């Protein structure tokens, strides 16, 4: 029982040593930055040693906390420096003048900041790159070749607000009226009503539905003249013998 309590105290002391300060976004986005799993773990170990007061842990110390071999750790450190994720700085201690080295990860955080800012800017770029959509009223005025009357504007608003037709479906009905050369709102309203009655919801469905009524009539089949089949009189041939 005493051993169990001692173990509990020992574990509690370990857990109280503190937590590693690590940006969550780095853990989530390190793959997007071009870091491998092992390189990320190496960075975590460097940060852990740094928090413990060791700015320049040895290769042996890093290897003791990882599954990678010492030569692999050396290669990873070289790659991190070459790729610009990390630098090794010379530090001169004030007062004593003692020179030492330390791992510096400011370059990694700069890359992370640039990546984060580019992610924030991406939706804006996509939004501004979209072509501006024309107003539904403007499209109707262009097709009619004149400004819409107040009653026509009210009808157009009613299709949207009360009948809940989508702008795409209303434009498809307008195109149908143009093809039929019947440019008046009553005809367009009838088209929309027929589409609603037949559960037409998209312009593609409306296009397929309209094509059924535009198929050219098939020519009536001309009855073929049936030639009489020559009947062979077997009985007559038998009597001629």
Image: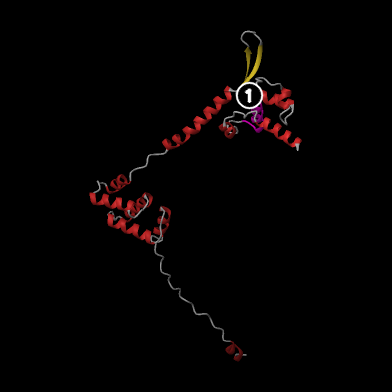
Q: Nearer the viewer, residue 97 or 222?
A: 97
**Taking 186 as reference, is 12 above or below it?**
above
Q: Quadrant of residue 194?
A: bottom left
Q: Residue furthest front?
A: 2
Residue 135 colored in magenta in the image: no
**Taking 22 as reference, is 206 above or below it?**
below
Query: How did the renderer colour the structure?
Result: secondary structure
**Taking 67 as reference, is 217 above or below it?**
below
Q: Nearer the viewer, residue 104 or 13?
A: 13
How many labels were placed on the picture? 1
The N terminus is located in which quarter? top right
**What residue lies at 55% left-to-right and 26% top-to-bottom?**
111
The C terminus is located in which quarter? bottom right
Does 150 sit left or right of 209 as displayed? left
Does 66 sit left or right of 172 as displayed? right
Q: Residues within 10 Å of mark 1 (few under 14, many from 20)?
A: some
Magenta stretch, overall SS: helix
Residue highlighted by disc 1: 51
**Taking 166 as reference, is 32 above or below it?**
above
Q: Quadrant of residue 98?
A: top right
Instruction: Give the x, y percent position of residue 51.
Output: 63, 24
Write down the region rendered in magenta. 35-50
Q: Under tag 1, what secondary structure?
A: helix
Residue 36 colored in magenta in the image: yes
Instruction: Give the x, y percent position of residue 46.
Output: 65, 25
Instruction: Give the x, y percent position of residue 38.
Output: 67, 31
Instruction: Give the x, y percent position of residue 100.
Output: 66, 14
Q: Nearer the viewer, residue 202 or 94?
A: 94
**What residue lies at 49% left-to-right and 30% top-to-bottom?**
117
Q: Quadrant of residue 64?
A: top right
């Amino acid at each position: 029982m005493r051993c169990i309590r001692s173990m509990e105290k020992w574990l509690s002391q370990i857990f109280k040593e503190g937590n590693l300060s690590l940006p969550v976004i780095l853990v989530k986005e390190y793959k997007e930055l071009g870091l491998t799993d092992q390189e990320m773990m190496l960075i975590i170990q460097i940060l852990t040693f740094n928090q413990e007061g060791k700015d320049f842990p040895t290769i042996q110390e890093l290897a003791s906390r990882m599954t990678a071999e010492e030569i692999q750790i050396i290669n990873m450190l070289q790659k991190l420096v070459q790729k610009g994720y990390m630098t090794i700085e010379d530090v001169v201690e004030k007062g004593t003048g003692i020179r030492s080295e330390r791992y510096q990860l400011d370059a990694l955080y700069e890359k992370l900041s640039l990546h984060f800012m580019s992610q924030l800017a991406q939706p804006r770029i996509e939004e501004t790159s979209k072509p501006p959509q024309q107003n539904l009223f403007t499209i109707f005025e262009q097709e009619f070749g004149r400004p819409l009357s107040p009653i026509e504007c009210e009808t157009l608003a009613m299709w949207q607000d009360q009948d809940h037709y989508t702008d795409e479906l209303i434009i498809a009905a307008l195109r149908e009226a143009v093809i039929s050369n019947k440019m008046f709102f009553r005809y367009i309203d009838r088209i929309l009503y027929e589409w609603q009655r037949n559960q037409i919801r998209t312009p593609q469905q409306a296009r397929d539905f309209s094509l059924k009524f535009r198929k050219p009539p098939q020519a009536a089949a001309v009855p073929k003249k049936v030639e009489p089949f020559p009947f062979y009189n077997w009985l007559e041939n038998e009597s001629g013998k």
